[in-house]
Image: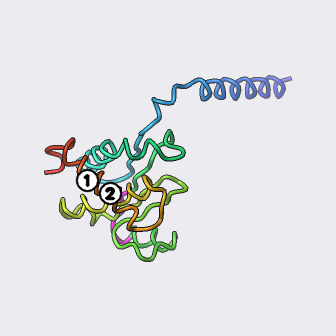
Amino acid sequence: MEDRQRFSFWICFQFVVLIYVLCMPRGTVAGEVVIVGGTEAQRRFISCVAEAAANELRRIPNADEPMTFVILEHRKFLEARDAFHAHGASLAFSNLTSSRVYLSSRVFVDLETAMWCIPHELGHFATQSLFEGHAELAAERIRWRTRQICGSASQ
């Protein structure tokens, strides 16, 4: 009898979760950014750049899914890069399928490098393209917007 009660509880729990997911307003998830690693200042900067890119990213498929940024110590970044076969990447690479951006800690050596790398990776998402030129066109718009809205975070 105990197994039957557990099974009934499990079915009810799954049903409640399903109803919640189906009824949850999409706006609560859209544009969510998850940042793993890094310092508080680095996380603030990434959040600001992601906010600046929101209009560009709103048009992509699965725009309501959270995007994850993973900041790794450079040696760990190189290991991740090799595991994903992103051999051309020296400081950052993206995985469009999993909505993840992997960043070397060296991206944050100076503002110029951070302002180049992070918008560029978001440009890949905005264009849904692996081509660097396409990503860079979107990145320029994201950089301009970042300078407009981030103020002291980009100084």
Range of magenta residues: 71-75
At 26% from the left and 62% from the top, the residue drawn is 116
Toward which corner of the image does residue 34 lie, by quadrant? top left
Q: Residue at x 33, y 65 (%)?
A: 104
| Residue 57: x %, y % from top left | 42, 46
User: 48 or 15: nearer the eye?
Assistant: 48
* Label 1 – label 2 distance at C-alpha: 6 Å
Horizontally, residue 129 falls left or right of residue 41, namely right
User: Is 26 placed left or right of 50 in the picture?
Assistant: right
Q: Quadrant of the N terminus?
A: top right
- What amino acid is at disc 1? Arg
Q: What kind of residue is marked 2?
A: Ala
Q: Quadrant of residue 15?
A: top right
Q: Please give the name of the residue rendered at 45% of the width and 47% of the height, measured from the top-left corner.
A: 67
Assess disc 1: are there few (<14), some (14-19) or many (≥20) residues with their C-alpha within 10 Å of its C-alpha: many
How is colour applied across the structure in the image? rainbow
- The local secondary structure at tag 2 comes to helix
Vertical relation: 110 (above or below) 142: below
Count numbered badges in the picture: 2
Q: Quadrant of residue 118?
A: bottom left
Q: Residue furthest right?
A: 1
Reply above or below: 23 against 63. above
The answer to the question of whether label 1 and label 2 lie on touching residues, with beta carbons closer than 8 A, is yes
Q: Front-most of 7 and 129?
A: 129
From the top left corner, tell me how far across and down residue 76 is, in percent. Answer: 40, 68
The one nearer the camera, 142 or 84, is: 142
Q: Is residue 48 above or below residue 4?
A: below
**Residue topped by disc 2:** 139
Q: What mark, if any, has residue 143 been given in the picture?
A: 1
